[in-house]
Image (cartoon, rainbow, N blue to C red):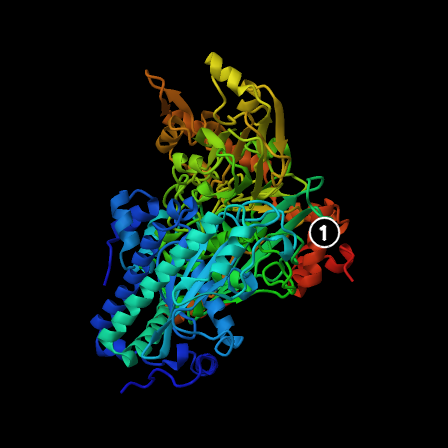
Amino acid sequence: MTSYSKEVISDLVAGTLPWPQTRRIMSAYKDDDRFFKYVAVLQDRVGWKDPILLPVGDHLFICQSGDERVTKCECGHSFGDYRKNWKLNASIIVRDSEETLREIYPNSDLPDPDWMEIREFICPECSTLHEVEAAAPGYPIVHDFQPDLEGFYRDWLGKPLEPLIRGG
Amino acid sequence: MLDKPASALRIRERLIESERLMDETGCYDGITELKLRNQDPLKFETLHTKLRAYCVSAREMARRISASPGVREVGEMVVAIYTPEGDAIALSNGIMVHVHTMSRFIKWMIRNGYEENPRINDGDIFANNDAFIGTVQVPDVIDVMPIFHSGKLVGWAGAVCHELEAGGITPGGDVALAQERFTEGLFVCAEKVGQNDELRRDYVIRCERNLRMPIYWVLDEKAKVASCIDMRESVKSLIDEIGLDYWMQVSKEFIEEGRRAQLARTRQLTVPGIYRGHTFYGHVTAGKPGYQPLGDPDWLYNMPIEMEITSDGKIIMDFEGTQPWGYHSMNCTPAGMDGGMFVTLTQHMNFEGLVNDGAWMATELKLPHGTWTNPDSEMVATATSWALLLPAYGVFQRLLSRSFIARGFVEEAFVGQVNSPMIEMGGTSQYGKLFGMAHFECAAAGSGALAIKDGLDTAYVGWNPESDMGNIEIWEQNMPMLYIGRSIVPNSGGAGKYRGGCSFLSTWLVSKTGHLRLVTSEHSSRVFDNGGLCGGYPAPTCQKHRAVRNSNIFELAEKGTPLAHHTGTNPYRSELEVRLEGEHVTLEGPYITAPHKTGDVFTHSYNGGGGYGDVLERDPVKTAWDVENGFLTKEAAEGIFGIVLDEDEEGFPVANLDATKRHRAEMRARRLARAKPVSEWIANERDRVKAADFAPEVKKMYASAIKLSPRFSRDFSTFWNVDAKSTFGVE
């Protein structure tokens, strides 16, 4: 069975593994023990102790926080119950004018702000830009991912999660 | 004796039986156990690899027969081997989107009584380019030939080439101006076009008399027939070696194994749950010559996608909430949607090569009737369906990528494909002859970023994993235009920790012709038709076209004055305007104008890919390299990424790490100062939504989605706490 050390997974996730080695990992049969090594790497990276249950973005994690399961920023800021859309508890910058769109697209033709706006969802504490939506004005904010967390741990990983004592 | 010998049933009954067995057992053709694989796994794998080798070799041979630079240079071809019922067993590389569209074509003939009339005999050649029977668009012409052994139908060999000219209302293959089926070009509808291994002369004459450049289509036909015969003979020799009964069983086990492998891979690489995303596409044609007033000239489509990964590993893609079909060339049939799914899966999850229709069977598409994904009229045009397919499957790639990131397979996460704007052309060639051609250098867009590195620059398209822009000299042989530039477009990849791959832009001098029609398609207007992931921005994919008519380029060349080789980086005054005199044109939407002539200059820009991650985490050293090599500008490095660059003694950019750190700290503080809570934004925005205070095209988009989709209507109402129907006047 293919398996890599935690150090290799750590470099891979950080984007610092040399390309020939990365290429070999991409081409090889996948390592079935990846998930928990990956989570361990991320757990070492964050500055808090709540166990990470599932990464859902580059710096966003569902974690066990006391009796609750919440979506958390890498800085420790909680966006609340993981089953709810974290974006609704984020901060937002909307680019809906030529001036603000031009800041990101300095030399290309721009969208018509009457047809499309760029929405940036950021952490209100550390300002990390977690997600960008390009949407028509008035388009509801998307709930990107609703994982079947319990089913994943129970049926796919064979390690059922502890039942929740209370909501979240 | 094996369980399932070559069936005595007629093939139509066999197809129905096969589908019934799949329904009853959940396994392909009722194969609940991979007996031959278990008996001798090595023999099983060797045979499967052999079949793939037959396909790859047949395709390479056929490419040498073709006259089309699309097939020869860019590889716009795929071949595959099928079961008698029309399920793909093995396939070549190339435009794999068609592996399943060919399957639909074969099944269509079987269901429609082709055994009785026109009959299916050894040596017959059947062709099709009707998307409602089984292909994506008119230029994708399929040829299939039955494989007989010992007097029994034992399979099919099939081949597709993308034709560079289809004889439609506008020249080229992707007929941009087609608004109904009747203007899309030459249709061949599941027709027997040859017998005894030879194309019928009357069919060839029809092609010769209905196409602007028949040499491409006709020689591609010969190339496809040659590849089918090659695969057929290889399969027959293989059956001589392994026996007919073994073949009939093993070919089906390959497919069932493919189905199981796909389910297992989904369970291995992803996380079950619901994933959502969307993208948009804008079309602007008001006032353009040639468009018939059949529908709104300007429109906006939304493409929401909900993907479910079930606990058994099935991937279900649901397009509910998207727009109705329209009088344009971008509609797509279920065959095309299947094709999009198949080609995406082959790249993202079945990368070891031994993929077949089994992978497709482990997925499900929900295509709402009446939408562009599943039109309720077979008269709609699909000539440029990639315009919507590519953005839609780009969303699929981002949804899959989120699942890879969740599971830890970050090296597989990929922000996805973008549209590949095409130029079609026709008129009088540089040789003084009638010509028509699709320019296929679009087969080399920038890719979306990965979760661990930048995207590929000018080296990826979704529809052909063997991306290639072709050599300039070959294209110049085939059209009355000369390249005066082919350049990377700086900042054309979506910004991010890892940027999207950059696009390129070509600049041509129209040469040796008094009549060149240029038509473009598959590019969005007024909206980006792609996205970023995890904080990355979408790539800027709503480029306009720029041209100069009656330019003074020959005078400048004679004087040795510098020419314009690209449009430059000033969005308000292009290099063409700076360096050339003449009638300057900047055109939004499809480029459909009066013919060009010698001395005119034309530019066309392709697309970069979306970015990944927060821009303020981008590596400063890598960024200095990007600036040095023209992928980013220094202004973008500082203004978007917060990276301060100095110059070394030779004038090359060098990252100033301390200044970058300070600058980024300021930018982060500015972000926080500028941002507001989402709840506050929603409260303010709700007033605008309640008043439906949107552009007419946006209002129309909402009204259509609300009318067609109860779920969209409900979600919209819930999110904004409004009554969606009354807000947009939907009955």
Q: Is residue A161 visible?
A: no
Q: Is residue B617 left or right of residue B136?
A: left
**For mark 1, what is the residue?**
B295
- Where is residue B155, by image quadrant? bottom left
- Where is residue B47, by image quadrant? bottom left
- Front-lying residue, A160 or B607: B607
- Where is residue B619, by image quadrant? top left
Identify the image quadrant of the N terminus of chain B. Answer: bottom left
Q: Position of residue B207 (x, y in %)?
A: 52, 54
Question: Residue at 41% across / 44% down in the picture?
Answer: B69
Q: Amino acid at mark 1?
A: Gly
Q: Dot 1 lies on which element?
A: loop
Q: Position of residue A38 (x, y in %)?
A: 33, 55
Q: Is residue B473 left or right of residue B105?
A: left
- Front-lying residue, B20 or A65: B20
Q: Is residue B48 depicted above or below B489 in this figure?
A: below
